[in-house]
Image (cartoon, rainbow, N blue to C red):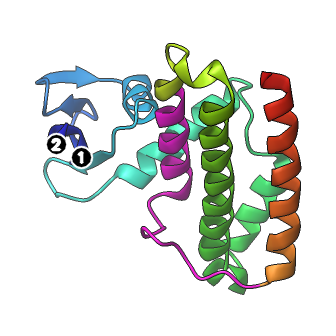
Amino acid sequence: MAETAKPLLIKRYASRRLYNTETSDYVTLEDIATFIRQGREVQIVDLKSGDDLTRQYLLQIIAEHESRGESVLPVDVLTDLVRSYTSQASSVVPQFLAASFEMLRDGQSKMMENMTKVSPMGQMPGFEAMRAQQQAFFKAMTGGMMGSSGPEREGGEDLDEIKRQLAELQSKLAKMGK
């Protein structure tokens, strides 16, 4: 298990081919997306310059999924992201996105914990793989911007309201599991 803790190193050759250093074979963007969904951290580096290309390739994977109609990001969010690159908001946006995804991940994590306690879903085959896939998704979406504790939270009223709504959803899910 220690092997999966370190990032999977993918080297990009001058020909733009991607080489998996663990299995000594070439991989595609879809292969890399699969590794990430399976919970692996991935690092993509240019063989010649040593530049880290991970962010560029993760964005490319997201763009390909979006172009195939697998839309996760609403147009309004994409538009605001583009605007943030040309405004002073760019300094706030990464922290905001990181905090938002952390809150979403924490809420989903608590929901998954409650489902395993209350519902037999926790014993279903593939349940742990689904949980790992969700965690990998959030890591990919936040681009590793968050530390283990995440940014400090402010605005307790909004957070309390979100917690209340989450508790209601968890209660409804628990009732459905019975």
- Residue 170 horizontal side relative to residue 165, left or right: left
- Residue 131 horizontal side relative to residue 69, left or right: left
Q: How many marks?
A: 2
Which residue is painted at 79% across and 81% down in the image?
156
Residue 16's place in the image compared with 101, above or below, is: above
**What residue would you read off at disc 2?**
2
User: Is 45 in front, or is 22?
Assistant: 22
Which residue is painted at 48% across and 68% down in the image?
146
- Residue 142 horizontal side relative to residue 47, left or right: right
Q: Which mark is residue 5?
A: 1
Q: Is residue 151 magenta?
A: yes
Where is residue 94 shown, x and y percent of the image? 60, 71
Which residue is painted at 88% across and 55% down in the image?
165
Q: Secondary structure at mark 2?
A: helix
Residue 147's place in the image compared with 111, above or below, is: below
| Amino acid type, mark 1 | Ala
- Residue range of the region highlighted in magenta in the rendering: 130-154
Which residue is painted at 24% across and 59% down in the image?
51
User: Is 144 in front, or is 52?
Assistant: 144
Q: Residues within 10 Å of mark 1 (few under 14, many from 20)?
A: few
